[in-house]
Amino acid sequence: VLNWLHSSVGLSWAWSIVALTVMVRMLLVPLTVKQIHSMQNLQRYAPQMKEIQKKYKQDKQKQNEELMKFYKENQINPAASCLPMLVQLPVFLGLYYALKNFAKHPPGGAAAVAHHDFGWLHFIPSIADHTTSHWGGFVLLFVYVTSQMASTLFMATTVDKMQRYLFMAMPLVFVFVIAHFPAGLVLYWVTTNLWTVGQGLIRSEERRVGKECRSRW
C-alpha cells in the first residue's frame, strides 16, 4: 500500500504513511462505533458495577461471576473497547518491519534519500531513521505526547480520575522508548491520535447539541 501511494498516487513516503493511517482508521469506523457504544454502556452502568465490586470485595471470584452476569444481562462487551487497537496491531508491526527494511535498502537507492524522498516538510530527513536522529524528531515526539494525552482524555471516560491521570502520564514515560522507533512509526501513531481527538471533538459537539435540544423541548 505504501509503494502504491508513493509510486502511483505520487505522495512522499511520509505523506503515504499519513494516508495509510487515514485509510486504516476509515476501515475501523464500524469497530470504533462499537467501541464508543461499549464505553457509553460502561459509563451508564458504572454505579451499579461499583456496587457489585463493593458488595463482593472480599470474594474476587464471586465478584467476577456477578460482573459477568451483569454484563450479559445488560449486553455489555468490555472487550469491544480493545478491538480497534488489536486490529491495528498487525498494521503497526508490518509498518515497523517495513521501515527497518527501508533503512537498510531505501527504495530508489541513496539518491532518493539525498533528494529528501523520505522527507516530511523537511523536519525529518528520513522516516526510517530513529526519531531523535534529527531535531525535527523532537518536534514529532512533542506532538506525539500532546496528541496521546488528548486522545486519552477523550477515550478514558469510563475510568476514575486517578486512573485517567495515570493513563495521561503514560506517554511521558513511553516517550523514551518511542524515541528509538523509526520516525515514520511515530508519524503513524501521531496521525492515529489526531484522528481519535477529532472523533472525540465530534462526539463532544454532538452531546452538547443533544443537551441543548433536550433542554429546549
Image: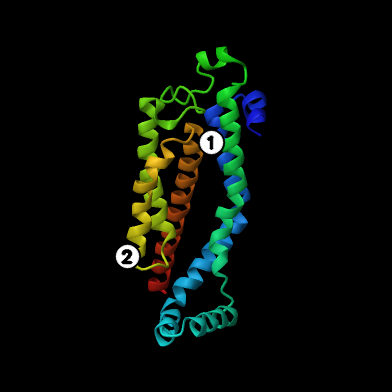
Of the 4 image quadrants, the one containing the C terminus is: bottom left
| Labels 2 & 1 near each other (Cβ < 8 A) | no
Question: Which of the 4 image quadrants contains residue 111?
Answer: top right
**Residue under the point 55% across and 82% down:** 65
Frontmost of labels 2 and 1 is 2
**Residue under the point 62% across and 17% down:** 108
Task: Please give the residue where the numbered disc 2 appears in the rendered image.
Answer: 162
Mark sitting earlier along the chain (2/1): 1
Query: Which amino acid type is shown beneath numbered disc 2?
Result: Met
Judge by depth and name the residue closer to the eye, 110 or 45: 110
> x%, y% of residue 147?
39, 45
Q: Residues within 10 Å of mark 1 (few under 14, many from 20)?
A: many
Q: Secondary structure at mark 1?
A: helix
* Residue extending furthest toward the bottom: 55
Residue 12 in sight in this render:
no
Give the vertical position of 82 relative to 14 (above or below): below
Task: Please give the residue where the numbered disc 1 appears in the rendered image.
Answer: 18
Of the 4 image quadrants, the one containing the N terminus is: top right
Question: Which of the 4 image quadrants contains residue 125?
Answer: top left
Disc 2 and disc 1: Cα gap in Å? 33 Å
Q: Residues within 10 Å of mark 2 (few under 14, many from 20)?
A: few
> x%, y% of residue 115?
51, 14
> x%, y% of residue 36?
52, 63
**Residue under the point 35% across and 38% down:** 142
Q: What count of labels does the image hold? A: 2
**Residue under the point 54% across and 69% down:** 78
Residue 7 in sight in this render:
yes
Question: Which of the 4 image quadrants contains residue 33?
Answer: bottom right
Judge by depth and name the residue closer to the eye, 177 or 141: 177
Q: Secondary structure at mark 2?
A: helix
Query: Which amino acid type is shown beneath numbered disc 1?
Result: Val
